[in-house]
Image (tube, rainbow, N blue to C red):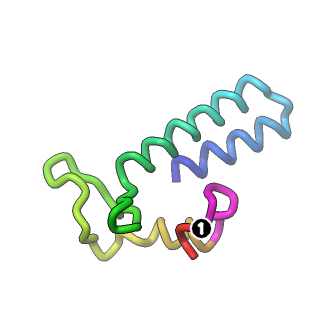
Amino acid sequence: MYLLGMRVTAALAEAKRDKRLKKKATEAFTAGLKKIEKEMWDEEKGFYHAWWDRQKGSPDWLMADSLYGQVELVLSCSKFLFSITRYF
C-alpha cells in the first residue's frame, strides 16, 4: 500500500505541477520497490513472500489474512505499479 501511495502522490504532484514533491515521491517509490524486490522476492521459488518477521524472517507459509492486500493490488493496480509478467 505504501508503494501505491507513492505512485498516487507522484501523479497528484504532477497534476499540481509540483516538481519537488513528484521527485520525492518517485524516489520513495523506487527505493521501496527495490527493498521489496530484495527482501520479499524468492527467485528460486518464483514468488513474493507474503510477510516478514524479525524473528522468523520470511517463511514460505502465510496467515489467512496475508493475501488481502496482495489480491487487491494484483486485481486493481498491478499494471500501474509493476510489470505484470510475474503475476500472470
Instruction: Give whichever of 63, 47 is nearer the camera.
Output: 47
Counting from the top left corner in percent of width and height, residue 41 is at 39, 57
Q: Is residue 27 above or below residue 66?
A: above
Secondary structure category for the residue under label 1:
helix
Within the magenta stretch, is there residue 10?
A: no
Residue plotted at (53% across, 67% down): 86
Residue that sits furthest to the top in the current view: 20
Which region of the structure is painted magenta?
76-85
Q: Is residue 52 above or below residue 47?
A: above
Counting from the top left corner in percent of width and height, residue 79 is at 68, 63
Secondary structure of the magenta portion, mostly? helix
Report the residue marked by disc 1.
85
Counting from the top left corner in percent of width and height, residue 76 is at 64, 69
> Horizontally, is 17 left or right of 60 in the view?
right
Within the magenta stretch, is there residue 80?
A: yes
Q: Quadrant of the C terminus?
A: bottom right
